Image (tube, rainbow, N blue to C red):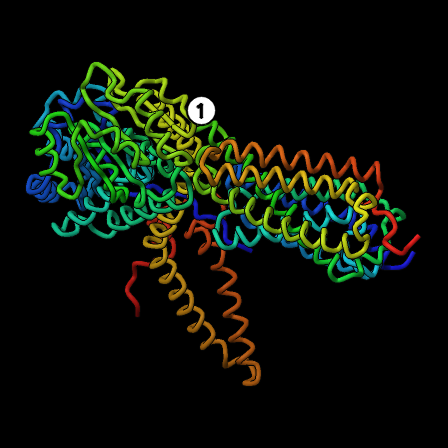
Amino acid sequence: MPAAPASRQDLPLLLVGTDHRCAPLELRERVSYAGEAAEELLVHLLARPELGEAVLLSTCNRTEVYVKPRQDEGSYQAVLELAFSSRVPEITEEGRLYVKRGLEAARHLMGVASGLQSMVLGEPEIHGQVKQAATLADAVGTSGTLLRKMFQAALKAGSRARTETAITGGAVSLGYATVELVKAIFKHIEATRILVIGAGETGRLATRNLLDKGAQRITVTNRSADRLADFLKEFPAVDTVDFDQRNSAITVSDLVVVTTGASEPVVTAADVRSAMGRRPGHPLLLVDLGVPRNIEPAASRTENVFLHDIDSLEKLIQRNLKRRREEIPQVEEILEQELDHLNGWFRGLEAEPLIARLQKQAEKVRRQELQSALGNFPPETHDQLDRLTRALVRKILHHPSMRLRGRDGRDTLPHLDLVRELFKLDDEDE
Amino acid sequence: MSSLETFLSAAIILLPLTYLLAALAYGWLFFAGTERAKRLSTPLLLTGLFLHVAFLAALTLHWAQFPAGDVSQALSVVAFAVGLTYLLVEWRGRDRSTGFWIVSVIFFIQLLSSMLRQPEAVAQSALLKNAIFAAHAFLALVAYAAFVMAAAYGFLFLRLYRELKSGLFALFYGKLPPLAALERMMAGALHIGWLALTGAVAIGIFNGYQRYGESGESWVADPMILLTLATWSLYGLALLLRRTQQWQGRQTAIVSVAGLCAILLSLVAVNFLVGNFHSLGPATGQT
């Protein structure tokens, strides 16, 4: 019969933090720590007698300090002063900070690592950032057994959420939505011939996204040669074509991304019809990232042409976000499982040594009493008596051991100090 | 009733039932994507196919001929061929995304076969015991199985094409192989079907002349032959237009789907009007 899950006991943890939901950027950026500043803060935190361990998680959207308090009193004040109010006094205004303790702090961190707390639900970068925070604290020497274990559990929860659910599935940015459309039509982006018309900021972002996802055949064109030259400095591997030759380039492309600042369309419906006439049977994906639109909408009426503008990409993004939201219950289930494991581990930390001492003490008493009684029994019964007394002790200690481990299904747990006192477990061995 | 007949009677019900369960499992996988659905779908299909092998073997034993004695048997062979082909495609591509649609078609065809079953009407034909004619029947059934696959992929192509064109991103988007892959799979199945049908027609003509001589009247007017020639022409034209690039993926997909519907309707009609697959007159020298 499987053991009942361990009853939950609060971990000695404190979280003080702020994020994009409760503080605007101008406050968050002032309590953002990176590099040496982060290391210094960690060292200062641990120099305080109220704090036993500390880890700092600071990203563009959140700054959170996780500590193991040595004393309940003063730990919150210590964190608040050192990490937040010394830089931004107004951050103590109501609603700017959140404070969580014990398992709630652990659950919050797991939610962060799983992307549930991110500005874009399910964004995967936070997992790496949580890992970096744990690594930094380790390197500086401010994390100990508890926080190290908690961060490991959070990272595991995050990994499980990514692999067992679709919380990170689907593109949620314009660039990646374009890539997703390519894969829906052509399958392999590596073999997709891509033409980017427009070498401005949006064109660079689109090219960067495409290259990140494995695109290898990118050609770019721009009206201004200077801007094109700048573009090539950042992306030396892409090919170029004259702006006037763009229609010929469309003929040999699978994906055309148009992102110019032109007020009139630079790709007309007639251009598209003409291009498709020279390559019938091959689908063409047109992505118009311009405002006003750079591609005549009538181009979408051509057979085998798929035209998408910002609105339709946004629709795709919203669809993907909706699907991510549907994964939240599954992710929360994973978090509960990992929280149970963490709690079980912590219970073991505290209770196992005590259980071992209890069993040792009971064994000592059993041997003493057995030794003194054996003389009254014939020798052939000694083995039986030994077995009998062992079984008695085992049965008597079974329930208390289960209770201490928290596996008897009850919510409340006995104070370990009381157990020590009742059984005199602090006495030295004779 | 012999044990073979009992098995046949039971299998005719169990087969569509098993395929229905498999289709539901694949459907669960398509719509919900759960691990349990993944674990159930392929094993259920495999169960159906094993049962189907036993059923076709029992038919062959019972009638002592290739199991194409009537429309019902032919449809069952087609359903089996489609199942086997799909399983290969799934295994090679490690992709179950089209499973619901293909297995649903298998279920439908097998259900049709079960409903059209009339054991007393099965032609005990010397033809089917003839190796050359059996090759003709086999190639014809392979062709129809390929056309079924082409129609299924054509249907999926059309649905995905529509969603990508309109920016609706509804049921099919993100759940199917890419559009270009669906087009290739459809075209591949059409090519295989047309080539197999060409072989079947060629052998059939050869066999026809051998048996019935030059008096074509008695056998060329057979409804099944006329249907086959019409099918062969239609699909051949579609492939030609695709090859010369006048037709693009969407038109070919429409022909695939419409073509299969026409074939199935005609087969049902032939079954009711003629009773057997071929209503061939007496062979030369026979009365």
Whether residue A12 is visible to the viewer of this picture, yes or no, is: no
Q: Is residue A214 above or below residue A304?
A: below
Task: Name the quadrant containing residue A243.
Answer: top left
Instruction: Give the image location of residue A323, x and y in percent.
Output: 42, 31
Q: Nearer the viewer, residue B191 or B81?
A: B191
Q: Nearer the viewer, residue A69 or A190?
A: A190
Q: Name which residue lies at 53% across and 35% down.
A: B252
Q: Is residue B65 above or below residue B158?
A: below
Q: How many marks?
A: 1
Q: Secondary structure at mark 1?
A: loop
Which chain does the numbered disc 1 sit on?
B
Instruction: Give the image location of residue A12, x and y in percent.
Output: 27, 42
Q: Residues within 10 Å of mark 1 (few under 14, many from 20)?
A: some
Q: Which residue is mark 1?
A: B168
Instruction: Give the image location of residue A390, x and y in percent.
Output: 50, 70
Relative side of B9 to B101, left or right? right
**Quadrant where the N terminus of chain A lies?**
bottom right
Task: Name the quadrant containing residue B54.
Answer: bottom right
Residue at the far bottom in the pictured view: A379
Task: Name the quadrant containing residue A235.
Answer: top left
Q: Is residue A224 above or below residue A264?
A: below
